[in-house]
Image (tube, rainbow, N blue to C red):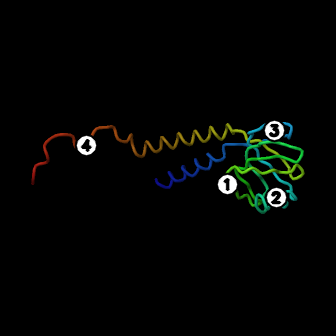
Amino acid sequence: MRGSHSAILVAVMFLATECYNYEPLRRSQLAPSTYVAVTLTESGSEELAQYIGPSILVVRGRFLSASDRGLTVSVAAVENRRGNSFEWKGESVEIPGEFVRAIEERHPANGKTVLLAGVSLVGFFAAYAAFGPGANGATAGGVGNPPAPR
């Protein structure tokens, strides 16, 4: 029984982190505070390595501004070519326009969110069935005489 609870917990944790989809976005559609994923070109990855790390392919974070030089992003995470993600604390990075392969905007994934809610509900009912309603405020011993000595 413990293994199935662990599997449900792992599934819920995975789904909770994946409740977003990224959709293509044009530069003209960018608005401040939009959460974006900026995919870098090969040369952009090499040129920006000293600022964001080696072999970084995707920069994720909040779009701050655009200028003739490029985009400024408050970085929340970066992803390397192998698909490994590394958290950031919101440091601002300017990404020159010629280093941008694609820009995508993050949107909530309604289907995944409904699936997460369904799995959570099933997990709740499974836990309730396994462990019962829990404490109801009554004590088992109550008030009365102690057991008679033998």
What is the crowding at mark 2: few (fewer than 14 residues within 10 Å), some, or many (at least 20)?
some
Residue linked to disc 4: 140
Depicted 95 relative to depicted 120: above or below: below
Name the residue: 74% across, 56% down. Answer: 79
What is the crowding at mark 4: few (fewer than 14 residues within 10 Å), some, or many (at least 20)?
few
Q: Which mark is residue 87?
A: 1
32 to the left or right of 141: right
104 to the left or right of 135: right
Q: CA distance from mark 2 to mark 1?
A: 17 Å
Spot occupied by residue 149 in the image (x, y as percentages of width and height) = 9, 52
Three-letter amino acid code of the residue under disc 2: Leu
* Mark found first going from the N terminus, 2 or 3: 3
Q: CA distance from mark 1 to mark 3?
A: 23 Å
* Mark found first going from the N terminus, 2 or 1: 2
Q: CA distance from mark 2 to mark 3?
A: 22 Å
Name the residue: 15% across, 40% down. Answer: 144
Spot occupied by residue 32 in the image (x, y as percentages of width and height) = 77, 38
Nearest to viewer (mark 4 / mark 2): 2
Task: Indicate the secondary structure of the residue bearing disc 2.
Answer: loop
Nearest to viewer (mark 2 / mark 1): 2
Q: Nearer the viewer, residue 47 or 132?
A: 47
Three-letter amino acid code of the residue under disc 1: Glu
Nearest to viewer (mark 1 / mark 4): 1
Residue linked to disc 3: 30
Q: CA distance from mark 4 to mark 2?
A: 67 Å
* Mark found first going from the N terminus, 4 or 2: 2
Spot occupied by residue 4 in the image (x, y as percentages of width and height) = 51, 52
Q: Which mark is residue 48?
A: 2
* Mark found first going from the N terminus, 3 or 4: 3
* Mark found first going from the N terminus, 1 or 4: 1
Three-letter amino acid code of the residue under disc 3: Leu
Name the residue: 82% across, 45% down. Answer: 103
